[in-house]
Image (spheres, coloured by chain):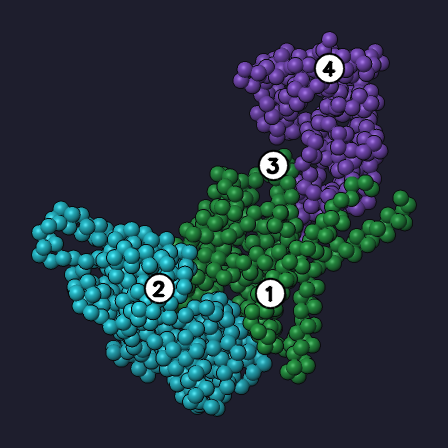
Amino acid sequence: MTATATSARQESHGLLSMIVELRAWIFLLLLVIFFEVWARSAYGQSFVINAYNLQAIGIFATAPLLLGLGQTFVIISAGIDLSVGFTMGLAAVVSAHAANMASGVLGLDLFTAMLFGLVAGIGVALIPGLVNGLLIAKLRVPPFIGTLGMYGVARGAAYLLAGGMTVPVSNAWYAWIGNGRVLGVPILVIITVIVVLLMHYLLSQTRFGQHTYAFGASRAAAVRSGINVSSLTIKLYVLSAVCAGLAGALYSGRFAAGAAQAGEPLLLDSIAAVVIGGASLFGGSGNIAGTVAGALVIATIQYGLVFINVEPFWQFVAVGVVIIISVLVDQSQRRLLGGRKDE
Amino acid sequence: MSSAPVLLSVNNVSKHFGGVEALRGVSMDLAAGEVVALAGDNGAGKSTLIKAISGVHRVDGGEILLSGRRVDFATPSEARASGIETIYQDLALADNLPVGANIFLGREPKRKAFGFLPVLDRKKMADAAKETMARLDFHVERFRAPVSTFSGGQRQAVAIGRAIYWNAQILIMDEPTAALGVPEQRKVVSLIKTLKDQGKGVIFISHNLADIFAVADRIVVLRRGVKAGERTPAETNGDEIVRLMVGG
Amino acid sequence: MERRQFLTMLGAGAAVAGTGALTLPARAENKKYTIALVPGLTTDAFYITMHRGAQAAADALGQDLLFQGASEWNVTLQVPVLEAVIARKPDAILIAPTDKVQLVEPLKKAFDAGIAVFCVDTFIGNGVFQTGAGDADFPLSYIASDNILGGRIAARALAKSIGDKGKVYVSNVKPGVSTTDQREEGFKAEIKENHPNIEVLETQFNDDDANKAAAQVQAVFGRTPDLAGIFGANLFSATGSANGVKQAGQAGKIKIAAFDAPESVVQELKDGTFEIAIAQHPAEIGYFGTVAAFAHLTGNSVPTAIGTGFTVMTKDNIDDPNVKRFLYTG
């Protein structure tokens, strides 16, 4: 093979990899164009140059995205965390109780009570995270099974603590965290952006992130390189649970009530966001930017279809189609790029 | 050869698994800048021997000396820390990471971004990768591409590069040419020669007599856990090696 | 709640052991019946309140009550629970069937075993019983709120609060649930018949996800700036819609009628999140279901349908003890 042919091929592969890498953002762009055209022709208004819509989609995307961020790490490590939804519910219930108790029983001021609630929500999530991690790392329970078990346990615990009710929180500061704005930007969005940056740093710039990729691609490689894979696994599931805990604690502020079922419908959305974002469920690939795009794709579809007033059931179809296309793109690039052994 | 210092001595080593004697009184030496080929039929004890040397198995009898000092490794990491690297057939590469990240896996270098934020030093990793691969006389261009996009020979080079970057003195290679096409096999053979020229000791297991004769200084043949013979390529031929392997 | 359930079971077990030891004299003097209540799901304030009402009636009548159900609204989870309950041979079963069709056969087994079957809240077949018409008319009575009427009440109250004109829509869970479907049906029928200046937009389904319900409000408001009101057909639909209104900066301008009344609605009515909340009377359903079962078991006839009422809650009446007592509590 001549040098020019090789480099031409490499270039075309480079372009292809770039498209594959950015596919979630490309989906998002196409969706936005679609809704923009529709909104302009049907309602004579812009879909995207519309601060109101952007805010609404931003808020809508925060909870599934927070779950998806932790899930990204877990999926890159070739695992899965099915318990995030009810870990979020557990955290929502506990943070609501804790904030109420802090102001009601301990007599703390509302701001401190709010912090107390947030910390308690995130703190309680450490338990399912740690148990998941120990089950998977030490007892070698497959992640699917281990976290499915935790799905049930966290759910039961959440319902028990809530007594089957939602737990109302009456705390102006807490409500402000959930619904307030700073310079017009919802606080929920600000918090989520900060967490996104933090997770991006963790995944792309630290040994922890690097080892997560290596572990997901080849357990043997990680083990023989002297990486402590048990401790890595435990950290991964704790991280995922903490993200869910934060999502739950914020839920209580936003809806002024903690509910055990707060995160139940979000589990699949979180996994979908990660997969649309380019991660493979076989592990080894994925990144935070992709998950952000994936969560925005899901939120935009669901919001946009209501905005342009399409029959609601199309939302499910549309999200499903995007997931399937995303996986197909992933597999075709594997076939094209993975088979190059003869250069 | 005799002038080079002996890196490794295996003296009268035995290992049994339950009632099965996998190794019985096997001895061999490896000097710096020497390549020893381990030959033998399936079940002859080749794998058990290299696993005993690399710390996977503990021997039941005999001793292993490293530069004249007796060693008894409990784990492969202890062996690695003493300069013995083993490259298995699966290479144990993280396919999704580039060369540098594979070389540094588990020991990634860091730098401070903006003067305070610790981040992975990718430049250092890429530079080290470039330099290491050059030492192997193996030139890869794409230091940012994941190693999954590399050819089998290139991947082998990455695995070897990872070993020598961390100053391995002894490299044990399990069937390094088995899964490769002919041109790739030739590259790996020349890679082994490069290692030899740099004074490393190499033990490699192979079924391929052509490779063995092309690069080995000595050939140790095992049969049913005992050493059936030891020859230099000059004093033997393929037929004799095969006879030693199968007996009779 | 779970613990209480456990204690109830212990109590029931002790009672069974007790009657076992003293079978003849006890039966001869005062026969004690076991009545089982199988809710649609156990983790819901509505059914917990229903349990409370049933327990009150059982205590008053000196009967045993068994409360067993699945943790979520799901046929495949409810049927095994029902079968386990049948195996314990209670004298009567009060059940909120999770499906009109799929629960017919499992309940037929109870009926064939000589257990008296009553439907509470939801029903099997068409909900009209003891007609001799077919397979699904064997339950003795249907004790429930009239959800169509509930929808109508919500429509009237919402219409009043938006000045009887403007655009509204129903935020609903998902299609196919008999009670929430009926609320929507009643709401739409009332608007159509009696409130010609109100336009009902397309229903939005939220999968019981408050986050989604909120985003839907924002999207609908985004294209319909003159949106005046929303009917949240269940708790999460209402809570989520209220948050969407808040996020859209329309708190107090877009009115919300909420269906169901856990204790949290007190706060939500007071701070204006909800304009009105329609409380069903689940305790009443539980109480009269148990009384109906007892009446039947002791040889009295019972009506084939018992309708329970609603209470419309607003911030003005919520402190009234006669209103407040209809909040759902454990």
Q: Colour of chain A?
A: green
Q: How many marks?
A: 4
Q: Label 1 sits on what residue type?
A: Val
Left or right of residue C267: residue B104: right
Q: Which mark is residue C135?
A: 2
On screen, A279 above or below B13? below
Quadrant that contains the N terminus of chain C: bottom left
Same subunit: marks 3 and 1: yes
Disc 1 secondary structure class: helix
The residue mark sitting in front, 1 or 2, is: 2
* Residue where numbered disc 4 is placed: B245
Q: Chain of mark 2?
A: C
Which residue is more in the foreground, C48 or C151? Answer: C151
The chain assigned the colour cyan in the figure is C
State the separation of the CA atoms marked 3 and 1: 42 Å
Disc 4 secondary structure class: helix
Same subunit: marks 4 and 3: no
Quadrant that contains the C terminus of chain C: bottom left
- Residue A138 rendering spot, x and y as whole percentages: 49, 38
On screen, C3 above or below B219? below
The chain assigned the colour purple in the figure is B
* Residue where numbered disc 3 is placed: A223
